[in-house]
Amino acid sequence: MIEGKNIFFTYHHPDSERAVLDHVSFQIPDGQIVGLFGENGTGKSTLMRIMAGVLTFAWGETDLTLDGVPVQKRRGEVACIFEEGTFLSDLPPRKYGQFLADFFPNFDMAYYEKLLTFFRLEEKAPRKMSRGQRAKLEIAAGLAKRTKYILMDEPFLGKDALVRQDFLKILSGSLTGEETLVIVTHELELMENFIDRAMILHKGRFAADVMMDDLHREGKNLVSLMKDTVGYEDKAYLSLFDEEE
Ligand SMILES: Nc1ncnc2c1ncn2[C@@H]1O[C@H](COP(=O)(O)OP(=O)(O)OP(=O)(O)O)[C@@H](O)[C@H]1O
């Protein structure tokens, strides 16, 4: 279980800015697939970095545990698939796989190879890849670690529409049901039937935290949930661009 207790976080002195995360608490049981949503700049990536144990606190306090143990002590059990990448090297994909296999005891080379083939990744250095290709390599490496916890921040960025759909199918097919997956994305429609639970961050707090089955039973969906909770109004600012008569 991922458990956050009373997490408070700001990047600058708390007197000078509103907290990015304002005393949030949550529990994510094993095996759950959670979508973490919210408008730009609401702290989703910040929370993901806290869950990954890679954000040190200038101000604020955190109590983030994995099965009751501080996350910093269990980093090897967390696969982080983040937009900025986690490459320690500029090794081409297959060499990178060998490198990871030495570090991660469960690294699944056969699965990694399949993903490289699916993503049609050539054996060249990441610095010579396009952004989308680098993101695919990051996903292949992250999933092949076969860790209990998987954190994905914007995994669909830079991938074309057909790859997004196929990637989601592969992801669904590759999960054993044991993994706990937290995914940050603005792709609400893709997530509609994939996640078990939706959590929406707004102004430093969780504005909604619902199980998808309950949401659907009420005849709602992620888009309507977002509109209800963060108050987004369609076309609200369009008048700014109206041509002057
Ligand atoms: N390294 C940093 N230093 C200072 N402020 C930061 C830093 N990273 C993020 N912030 C600020 O913290 C707030 C939350 O940012 P964060 O990246 O967590 O949001 P997000 O919800 O992931 O946004 P998006 O959907 O745009 O990716 C924003 O106001 C952002 O400007």
Image: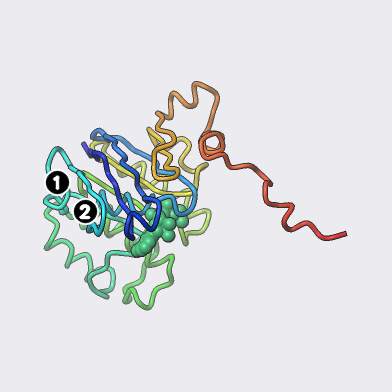
Q: Are marks 2 and 1 in contact (CB under 8 Å)?
A: yes
Q: Quadrant of the N terminus?
A: top left
State the image quarter where residue 138 is shown: bottom left
State the image quarter where residue 115 is shown: bottom left
In the structure shown, which secondary structural element does the residue marked by tag 2 occupy? loop
User: In this rendering, would 137 be left or right of 158?
Assistant: left
Residue drawn at x 23%, y 73% is 89
Percent of width and height locating residue 207: 44, 36
Percent of width and height locating residue 200: 43, 39
Residue drawn at x 26%, y 68% is 87
Q: Which residue is mark 1?
A: 70
Which quadrant of the figure shows ligand 1?
bottom left
Q: Which residue is mark 2?
A: 53
| Residue furthest to the right | 245
Q: Is residue 241 above or below residue 5?
A: below
Q: Which is more N-terminal, label 1 or label 2?
A: 2
Q: Is residue 165 above or below residue 32?
A: below
Q: How many marks?
A: 2
| Residue furthest to the front | 15
Q: Is mark 2 within 8 Å of ligand 1?
A: no
Q: Is residue 70 at all visible to an observer of this figure?
A: yes
Give the amino acid at mark 1. Answer: Pro
Percent of width and height locating residue 99: 17, 67
User: In this rendering, would 8 be left or right of 136?
Assistant: left
Tell me the CA gap for discs 2 and 1: 8 Å
Residue drawn at x 41%, y 36% is 198
